[in-house]
């Protein structure tokens, strides 16, 4: 049977397979579902496992996951090929340095920043790459009223300031900053007027920091690996303790802390509580709730509305669980009908909650992948409390 976005996913997969083949890999499509596709990965006659390409239809963006790679030694190469289309070896690095007029052997620093506003709290997140490799992460809570009034914008501004402080302490003279709020660059360059205390403070700090900055605008929440990671760190700083951020060895809670960190970090969307559960194992979703394909436009629009509603509720419920002492991470939509949320508590994985949203099952949670019966009861109570709050917000 045809899956909802099979053609779109296959086209993207085939494009990436061609890039992989140019760099000595062998790859082919091994599984397709509504919102993701799996590719086998081989090199030098060794099978390394599967790579997953996810698709967010609402935003028309793609991202990759590597948790099904049996050997993680290729992970960095795969991400570089996905994002850049080449491997940053010594020759490529020298070429980049020459293009930018840099001294040979001088390190290249790329910095991704983001801000977040959750339940009245503002946080910032910073990811620092050195020569294309993850080098440092910063995360913290913003408390200065000068910035908190601007919510996530204030967080992103704080991220730039903390990143520049760190660079100054390290003696770094030139960096590239990747950001999604357009004003960050234009206040500094004078393209936009800085007419508030916050924007003036920010502009003056950046202009006088003594660091040369190459500004690079990126589209927020578009699947760019390190931008998504900065977003997750910002949410952690704002009080939403995602499992991925909590378990990061290099996560820094206090602003301005310095030091080198060389630990390899997982990207956004990868597991941090327990393992990864394959879509088809033990669920037999297609048998219980068949997906109708070859839909008319009216049916397809209704289906997409259900999925958008489901994704929104899954993200909100994950936040709600996090605020109630759980580690929760919304992972994906399975088979176009169920949102999967990974749940843990006290550094232990509890399993997965599956929330169904179809024409017959409207926002119905299922706890068959939660191993402990007491946890199932407690989670269902929290779900009912969450839904009651949602209904109150709608004026029901």
Image (tube, grey):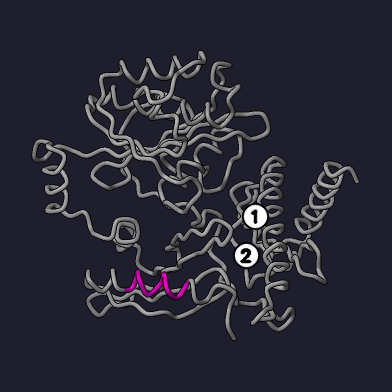
Q: Nearer the viewer, mark 1 or mark 2?
A: 2
Residue 215 position in % (x across, y down): 33, 35
Q: CA distance from mark 1 to mark 2?
A: 16 Å
- 99 on left or right of 134: left
**In this rendering, does residue 371 appear at all?**
no
Residue beneath the point at 64% across and 62% down = 340
* Whether residue 205 is situated above or below residue 320 in the rendered picture: above
User: Observer-nearest residue: 210 or 180?
Assistant: 180
Residue at 43% over, 19% down = 202
Residue 15 on the magenta segment: yes
| 122 within the magenta span | no
Left or right for 180, reference 111: right
> Residue 169 at x, y = what percent?
29, 22
Q: Which quadrant does the N terminus fall into? A: bottom right
Q: Residue 33 placed where, x, y %? A: 55, 75
Q: Which mark is residue 240?
A: none
Q: Residue 308 is drawn in which quadrant?
A: bottom right
Viewer-proximal residue among 389 and 262: 389
Q: Residue at x 67, y 65 (%)?
A: 304
Q: Residue furthest bottom?
A: 1
Please count the marks in the image.
2
Label 1: which secondary element:
strand
Q: Which residue is mark 1?
A: 343
Q: Which residues are magenta?
A: 9-17
Q: Residues within 10 Å of mark 2 (few under 14, many from 20)?
A: many
**From this viewpoint, which residue is outermost toward the left?**
104
Mark drawn on residue 333: 2
Residue depicted at 37% across the width and 29% down the height: 163
How far from the left and from the top, in percent, is residue 7?
49, 76
User: Taken as a whole, is the magenta stretch helix, strand or loop?
Assistant: helix
217 shown above or below 360: above
């Amino acid at each position: 049977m045809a899956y909802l976005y099979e053609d779109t996913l296959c086209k993207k997969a085939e494009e990436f397979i061609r890039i992989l083949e140019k760099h000595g890999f062998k790859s082919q499509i091994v599984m397709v579902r509504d919102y993701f596709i799996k590719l086998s990965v081989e090199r030098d006659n060794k099978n390394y496992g599967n790579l997953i390409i996810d698709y967010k239809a609402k935003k028309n963006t793609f991202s990759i996951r590597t948790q099904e790679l049996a050997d993680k030694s290729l992970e960095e190469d795969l991400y570089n090929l996905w994002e850049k289309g080449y491997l940053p070896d010594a020759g490529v690095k020298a070429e980049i340095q020459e293009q930018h007029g840099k001294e040979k052997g001088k390190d290249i620093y790329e910095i991704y920043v983001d801000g977040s506003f959750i339940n009245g709290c503002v946080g910032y997140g910073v990811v620092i790459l050195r020569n294309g490799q993850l080098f440092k992460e910063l995360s913290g809570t913003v408390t200065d009223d000068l910035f908190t009034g601007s919510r996530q914008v204030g967080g992103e501004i704080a991220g730039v300031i903390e990143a520049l402080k760190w660079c100054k302490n390290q003696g770094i003279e030139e960096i590239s900053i990747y950001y999604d709020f357009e004003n960050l660059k234009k206040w500094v360059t004078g393209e936009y007027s800085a007419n508030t205390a916050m924007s003036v403070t920010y502009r003056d700090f950046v202009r006088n920091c003594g660091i040369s900055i190459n500004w690079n605008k990126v589209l927020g929440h578009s699947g760019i690996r390190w931008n998504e990671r900065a977003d997750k760190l910002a949410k952690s700083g704002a009080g939403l303790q995602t499992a991925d951020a909590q378990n990061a060895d290099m996560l820094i809670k206090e602003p301005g802390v310095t030091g080198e960190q060389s630990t390899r970090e997982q990207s956004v969307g990868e597991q941090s509580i327990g393992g990864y559960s394959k879509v088809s194992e033990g669920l037999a979703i297609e048998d219980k709730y068949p997906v109708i394909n070859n839909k008319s436009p009216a049916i397809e629009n209704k289906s997409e509305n259900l999925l958008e509603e489901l994704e929104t509720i899954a993200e909100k419920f994950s936040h709600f669980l996090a605020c109630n002492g759980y580690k929760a991470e919304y992972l994906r939509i399975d088979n176009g009908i169920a949102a999967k949320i990974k749940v843990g508590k006290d550094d232990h994985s509890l399993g997965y909650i599956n929330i169904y949203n179809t024409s017959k099952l409207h926002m119905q949670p299922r706890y068959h992948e939660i191993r402990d019966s007491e946890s199932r009861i407690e989670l269902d109570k929290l779900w009912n409390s969450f839904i009651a709050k949602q209904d109150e917000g709608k004026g029901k």
